[in-house]
Amino acid sequence: MPKTVADVMTPNPISVSPETNLEEAIHLLAEHHIGGLPVINAAGELVGILSESDLMWQATGIEPPAYIMLLDSMIYLKSPKKYNEELHKALGQLVKDVMTPKVIIITPDKSLREAAHLMHDKRIRRLPVVNDEGQVVGMLTRGDIVREMASSQE
């Protein structure tokens, strides 16, 4: 019988709220050796995910957008809106400032094969596992899938 997401996921993942201090979230990631945290609001709903990639703006900073001057006008070669978003992430102090709000999810009853396809197609490293009530019940990572592949070969 094929394995399901529920068979392989990490149940009850560590999570943070949008109001969690970024320093605290960074310590959770490092202390537990994980690459991402689901972000849950006060109602228990998934509102985002905080990943190592989101934190890279904090470490690297950002470059001002390139521009050219034409007749005393500045023409940006990169979207100023995108620059403002990047600046907000680089200066953010709370999880909500840097998290990714659009999260791809999966349900526990889906096959592991389906989850692997979704992760591969969307180029994501982790999937929050959400039940019918919309609550996060687990986290599935690429590492979980690889470990399952290794154990099934033994």
Image (cartoon, rainbow, N blue to C red):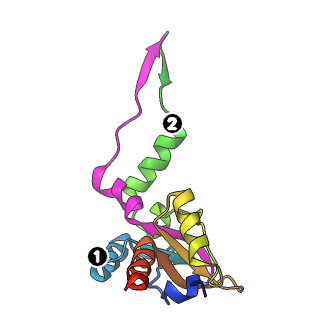
Q: Please tell me whether residue 65 is drawn above or below residue 154 in the rendered image.
A: above
Residue 53 image offset from top left, x and y in percent: 39, 59
Q: Residue furthest front?
A: 154
Q: Residue drawn at (44%, 48%), measured in percent from left and top?
A: 86
Q: Residue drawn at (50%, 89%), measured in percent from left and top?
A: 11
Q: Quick one: label 2 or label 1, which is nearer the N terminus?
A: 1
Q: Please tell me whether residue 154 is drawn above or below residue 71 in the rendered image.
A: below
Q: Which residues are magenta?
A: 43-70
Q: Quadrant of the N terminus?
A: bottom right
Magenta stretch: includes residue 148: no
Q: Residue furthest right?
A: 132
Q: Residue drawn at (37%, 36%), measured in percent from left and top?
A: 64
Res. 30 mark: 1
CA neighbours of label 2 inside 10 A, class few (<14), some (14 to 19), many (20+)? some
State which quadrant residue 35 falls in.
bottom left
- The amino acid sitting under disc 1 is Ala
Res. 80 mark: 2
Q: Quadrant of the C terminus?
A: bottom left
Residue 123 image offset from top left, x and y in percent: 50, 57
CA neighbours of label 1 inside 10 A, class few (<14), some (14 to 19), many (20+)? few
101 and 74: which one is in front? 101
Q: Please tell me whether residue 99 is drawn above or below residue 59 in the rendered image.
A: below
Q: Secondary structure at mark 2?
A: helix
Residue 49 image offset from top left, x and y in percent: 50, 69
Q: Secondary structure at mark 1?
A: helix
Q: Residue furthest top?
A: 71
Magenta stretch: includes residue 62: yes
Residue 13 image offset from top left, x and y in percent: 47, 85
